[in-house]
Image: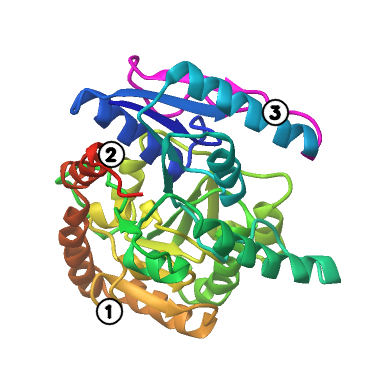
């Protein structure tokens, strides 16, 4: 079958880009599908993750104002769809762009693959009328648009409940990390893998570490992720006086080795759809701690079993949980072993068979 993915980009270092490349490769190599990927604004250059050479890449230039953006998007998507003539389009992008595709592309099967929380907030809110009103509008528009998708795929039961889409299908992301190795959980290191942005909530962790670090001066935090001039984490760390125990690194391809060198994984995001970094950490036998933000961590962490799931924003509870794991290697080993077993639920063969069944099925719409 001919499959056309429509995505913003595939050349970044994030979990979404890794999963898209992984799935596209699998569909070509294992199921022999003809796969094409359409990106935007040079979104397929200098790839961070490997992509099979048989995959056809297209890119469209969407420079200009908003009116020009919409006009170009509709025109260029229609052109590529006509050129590729796919049997199915899989849209892994925003609801507004998915709506534009559904309105402009006729007589084609379209599957919307949801990778965001409905409560997504892309930047820190300034306290004014417009910024306080926009999240409410975005929430309404996301719900409005989602209900108009032909087919809707969510990543977890929790995401399905959040979006509340009738007849939606749940297919979680597969885990790319296939390893029998595990951390020995003896190093005095904590890991975060995250880009520097408001929604990832690194500032929330820094506030936690400000409280915890004086009690454990020999413990360090390593953060791997793309830095940002707009969200200066190093400045925040310096202001809090914790720079001697927090180290920043740009993304690395061999992230598996970094998981194996630490003893705890933490996440303080403001929202997550299905955070693959939690599964990657678990695959390496790490106990995890995360805020119960909308809505991804609760789909992965079972509280007090494979990690700690903390009420969103409860800094005191997060501090207590982190200190428990720091103080007890036995607890780390117990949770880490459970986490390792749990990660096997997301084996790539199991997940991609679900995708292939959906793609090759006949829709009733």
**Residue at 31%, 69% in the rendered image:** 301
Q: Residue 91's spot in the image, x, y percent?
A: 46, 41
Give neighbour class at mark 2: few <14, some 14-19, many 20+ (Cα, 10 Å): some
Pointer 2 with pointer 3, Cβ within 8 A: no
**Quadrant where the image shows the N terminus:** top left
* Tag of residue 304: 1
**Residue at 65%, 31% in the rendered image:** 73
- Secondary structure, mark 2, is helix
Give neighbour class at mark 3: few <14, some 14-19, many 20+ (Cα, 10 Å): some
Queried whether the magenta region covers residue 65, the answer comes back as: yes
Say whether disc 3 or disc 1 marks the residue closer to the N-terminus.
Answer: 3
Apparent side of residue 359 relative to residue 296 in the rendered image (left or right) = left
Q: Quadrant of residue 158?
A: bottom left
Say whether disc 2 or disc 3 marks the residue closer to the N-terminus.
Answer: 3
Apparent side of residue 336 relative to residue 291 in the rendered image (left or right) = left
Question: What whole-number distance in Å separates the C-alpha atoms at marks 2 and 1?
Answer: 37 Å
Q: Quadrant of residue 321?
A: bottom left
Give neighbour class at mark 1: few <14, some 14-19, many 20+ (Cα, 10 Å): few
Question: What whole-number distance in Å separates the C-alpha atoms at marks 2 and 3?
Answer: 28 Å
Q: Which residues are magenta?
A: 40-66
Queried whether the magenta region covers residue 102, the answer comes back as: no
**Residue at 53%, 74% in the rendered image:** 214
- Secondary structure, mark 1, is loop
* Tag of residue 72: 3
Apparent side of residue 131 relative to residue 224 in the rendered image (left or right) = right
Residue 255 can be seen in this image: yes
Q: Residue 36's spot in the image, x, y percent?
A: 41, 23
Camera-nearest residue between 53 and 150: 150
Q: Nearer the viewer, mark 3 or mark 1?
A: 3
């Amino acid at each position: 079958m001919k499959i056309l993915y429509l995505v913003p980009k595939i050349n970044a270092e994030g979990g979404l880009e890794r999963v898209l490349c992984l799935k596209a490769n699998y569909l070509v190599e294992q199921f022999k599908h003809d796969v094409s990927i359409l990106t935007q604004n040079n979104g397929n250059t200098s790839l961070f993750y490997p992509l099979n050479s048989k995959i056809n890449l297209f890119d469209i230039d969407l420079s200009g104002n908003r009116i020009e953006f919409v006009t170009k998007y509709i025109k260029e998507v229609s052109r590529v769809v006509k050129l590729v003539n796919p049997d199915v389009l899989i849209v892994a992008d925003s609801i507004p762009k998915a709506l534009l595709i559904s309105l402009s592309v006729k007589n084609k099967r379209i599957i919307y693959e949801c990778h965001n929380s409905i409560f997504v907030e892309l930047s820190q809110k300034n306290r004014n009328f417009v910024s306080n009103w926009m999240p409410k509008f975005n929430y309404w528009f996301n719900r409005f648009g989602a209900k108009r998708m032909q087919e809707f795929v969510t990543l977890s039961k929790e995401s399905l409940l959040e979006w509340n889409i009738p007849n939606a299908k749940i297919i979680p992301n597969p885990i790319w990390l296939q390893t029998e190795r595990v951390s020995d959980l003896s190093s005095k290191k904590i890991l975060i893998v995250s880009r520097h942005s408001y929604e990832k909530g690194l500032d929330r962790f820094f506030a936690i570490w400000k409280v915890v670090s004086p009690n454990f001066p020999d413990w360090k935090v390593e953060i791997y992720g793309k830095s940002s001039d707009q969200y200066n984490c190093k400045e925040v760390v310096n202001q809090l006086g914790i720079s001697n125990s927090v180290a920043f690194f740009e993304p690395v391809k061999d992230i598996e080795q970094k998981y194996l060198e630490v003893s705890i994984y933490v996440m303080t995001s403001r929202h997550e759809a299905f955070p693959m970094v939690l599964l990657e950490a678990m695959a390496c036998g790490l106990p995890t701690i995360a805020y119960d933000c909308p809505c991804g961590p609760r789909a992965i962490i079972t509280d007090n079993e494979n990690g700690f799931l903390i009420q969103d924003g409860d800094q005191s509870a997060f501090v207590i949980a982190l200190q428990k794991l720091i103080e007890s290697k036995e607890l780390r080993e117990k949770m880490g072993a459970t986490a390792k077993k749990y990660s096997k639920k997301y084996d790539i063969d199991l997940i991609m068979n679900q995708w292939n069944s959906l793609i090759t099925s006949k829709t009733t719409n």
